[in-house]
Amino acid sequence: MKKFWFMLTALVATCFLVACRGSQGVSTIKENKKIVVATESEFAPFEFKSLVNGKDTLVGADIELAKAIGKKLGVKVEFSVMSFDNVLASVQSGKADIAIAGISVTDERKKVYDFSDSYYTSENVVIVKKDKVNDFTSADSLAKQTVGTQKGSVQETVAKKQFSKASVVSLASNGEMINELKSGQIQAVVLEKAIAEGYIAQNDDLTLASFNLKSDGSDAYAVAIRKGSDDLL
Ligand code: ARG
């Protein structure tokens, strides 16, 4: 009888593992002859749209990384572009096989997703208008002002913690956030350094704030994968 239960448990466990793996493992991707990669499109230099031979094309370091993964697996890469707050969820629901979008590894996210080794280390910075750089010299100097972050990003949490006296708004796109900063609807924006530097280089009226934010420990980017796809990981 004991042996029977043991066999049954083993059988159920194996089926479970096979089912999990089958859903998004390497073999399924190879069968489908493509890997679906969830990403976003306003996060230069990692993923952004650029004119290539007159055509609006998705380019950037993350895009190259995705293509290299596709090449290694011998399959086509299909990019599924969406707002950042949907990127991780699309991996969980199985709509995408992996997500590559400058995604920071956090303990919270690790509970739900598996992450590859990290491939980039970032740092949070604050952008303000040049003519306000001497007014906003600390997080507290932004009391009663509005600070913008991207919806679903770790910067949302960072801003809420570190700008406790300001009101923090979350916007779906970084471009939109920068426009609101320029037009004065919001007074500061929290972004990661490489992305912030790109916007500053393109906008004469913007600059980095003179103060630093505290690190929140979520500074490494990695590829997110649904839990259980060990061979893919
Ligand atoms: N690293 C931050 C996070 O994981 C922001 C990433 C935003 N990525 C993007 N493609 N907009 O929350």
Image (tube, rainbow, N blue to C red):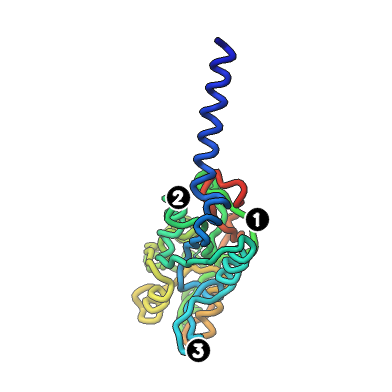
Spatial CA distance of label 3 from label 2 is 35 Å
Find out if the beta carbon at label 3 lies less than 8 Å from the nearest ligand 1 atom: no
Across and down, in percent, residue 217 comes to 60, 55
User: Callout 2: few (<14), some (14-19), or many (20+) C-alpha neighbours within 10 Å?
Assistant: some
Residue situated in front as seen by the camera: 177 or 75: 75
Q: Amino acid at mark 3?
A: Asn
- Which one is in front, 40 or 141? 40
Mark closer to the observer (3, 2): 3
Q: Earlier in the sequence, mark 2 or mark 1?
A: 2
Q: Name the residue beneath numbered marker 3.
A: 53
For label 2, the residue is 92
Total marks in image: 3
Residue 140, disc: none
Q: Secondary structure at mark 2?
A: helix
What's the residue type where badge 2 is placed? Answer: Gln
- What numbered label is drawn on residue 117? 1
The spot of residue 82 in percent (x, y) is: 40, 65
- Residue 171 image offset from top left, x and y in percent: 37, 67
Residue 211 is at least partly visible in this image = no
Q: Are marks 3 and 2 in contact (CB under 8 Å)?
A: no
Mark 2–mark 1 Cα distance, whole angstroms, equals 19 Å
Q: Quadrant of the N terminus?
A: top right
3 or 2: tag closer to the N-terminus: 3
For marks 3 and 1, give the CA distance: 34 Å
Q: Secondary structure at mark 1?
A: loop
Q: Amino acid at mark 1?
A: Asp
